[in-house]
Image (cartoon, coloured by chain):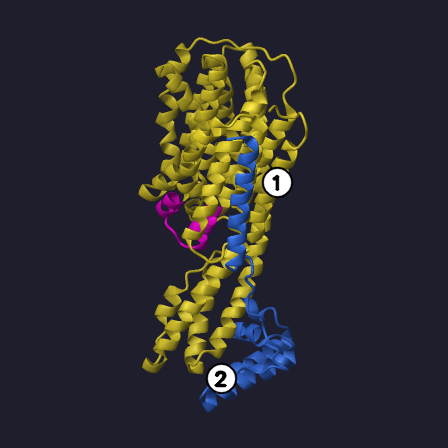
Chain colours: A blue, B yellow
Amino acid sequence: MSVRTLIAAALAAALVLVGSYAALGGGRYEPQPVADPCTSPSPRGSGLGQNLSLGAVDAVACLLHVSREELALALVSKRERDRLGPLGRLLLERLRAKLK
Amino acid sequence: MIRIGAVCLAVGLVLADSSIAVLALPAIYRDYDVDLGDLHWVLTSFNLALALAAVPAARLTRRMPPARVCAAGLLLFAAAALGCALATSFGMLVAFRAVQALGGAGAVVAALELLPGGRRAVTWWVASGVAGAAVGPALGGALTEGISWQAVFAVQVPLALVPLPFVLRAPGAARIGTSRPRVVPNLALAFLSAALAAALFLVVLLLVEGWGLTPLGAAAVMSALPLAAVAAAPLARRVEGVRGRAAAGTILVAGGLAALALLPRAGWGWTIPPQLLIGAGIALALEGLTEAAFAGRELAALDAGVTIAARHAGIVLGLVLMTPLLVGDLDHEKRAAELAGTARLLEAPISTGTKIELARKLSSEIEGTHGRIPDLTPAFRAVRPRPEERPAVARLERVFGGIIDRAVTSSFTNAFLLAAGFALCALAALGVRRSVPG
């Protein structure tokens, strides 16, 4: 086998593999974007209680200028809670009481 | 022949050591509770010390009989391996790894002077190093899972002592090199080694820490790489022209690494085709470049020292640049995955009480991992949903698994691309005309 044939074969093998992986969706992973709670409220569930809870989470998140996901994480994690300011922590306590 | 085998064992053992600890890394990571960003020092300290000590060790063989330098190196290597096995802290392990490399440097460069027969000596020496580096990860994985990560180092003690009597009886005197070392093949070798080190380190972390394979399972998956190298070796020898062979090999390595950066799904099967490409690339490029570094030169230990220094400096470069990139991307993807998972939990058709209970368990599981990739199964097992909610909770568990797998896989993209970039730098170095024979 000549050197040129070897280099051409190597290039072809590399391009075929990289091209196939890219065509199968490789490198196109995008995490689900977080929605703005002020303009795009949570999709509603079936029960009234559920809808009221989601509505309350949306309202508080909109007030604090955070996503509803960040607010929900702050409900259960001290690390996340510390990221909110004093007003945020106060509203979070109210929300927690309401959800109970 | 036994003497040649013993000297080759010494070379193979030392050069296997730069990769043998790779599959032990996840176990070391858990045992010592170190930051992921510091873990690479187990490999980096060894390779850095080897790179720095190789040339001084080669100069030492001009003043002392190579057999003595090789034997002293093996003794130091064995003693430090015992120290690694008994290390009680991460810092101690890293320090003993560096000492191991100092001994290893003396053993490897002096070994070239103990092998008979001009070009054949180089072939033996190169082949032993490539075989050691290829077998290292699988052997390390088997020992880590079968016994413990400490066994990876303990087993090296008797293996390093076996060649001693044969080495001490070997004739050989240092051949003095008369010209400056070849810069370009050694530079290309450094970049290629950076790419390969990054590839090994990243594939192991992805398989074991990212996708939860056992060390033995990961070793089996990673055996695709050395098997491809062995299968491609006869083809490599049939092609004349070192530069063309090295260029073809480097293209394969770069292609394999780029494919690893573009894995379509999380799953070990997707890593096999890129590993086959990288393995074939190693067979073509690594031997070719090492031969090029020695071509037309006297077989002085100094040439071996320069080549070893270049290879291991490249490994250090790969590890040092790639680790912060990986750690930063893991942090970024972790946050994105947490938010994506929370969104799915909020939308799930389950009661608010179950959502809060599940969120608490998941949060405590994630915080308990201290930045590692979490296993969320215990959190899902710990919640008690109503019977009608169970299918939705099971679906949520699968969704969360998918989010974590995709986030982890995506975190490795830039690091694999950087490794592919190193391979392309090696290719660029090869493009310098008349720098590499053939």
**Mark 2: which secondary structure?**
helix
Q: Which of marks 2 and 1 is in front?
A: 1
For the residue pair B112 and B227, the one nearer the viewer reads as B227
At x 63%, y 80%, the residue is A62
Which residue position is annotated with label 2?
A99
Judge whether B1 appears above or below B391 on screen.
above
Q: Give the range drawn in magenta.
A: B203-221
Classify 10 Å Cα crowding around label 2: few (below 14), some (14-19), many (20 and above): some
For the residue pair B81 and B89, the one nearer the viewer reads as B81
Judge whether B247 appears above or below B58 on screen.
below
**Mark 1: which secondary structure?**
helix
Q: Where does residue A37 sit, x and y in percent of width and height?
A: 60, 80
At x 36%, y 37%, the residue is B151
Residue type at numbered disc 2:
Leu
At x 56%, y 15%, the residue is B300
Which residue position is annotated with label 1?
B424
> For residue B156, which quarter of the picture?
top left
Chain that bears disc 1: B
Mark yes or no: residue B262 visible.
no
Chain that bears disc 2: A
Q: Badges 2 and 1: C-beta atoms under 8 Å apart?
A: no
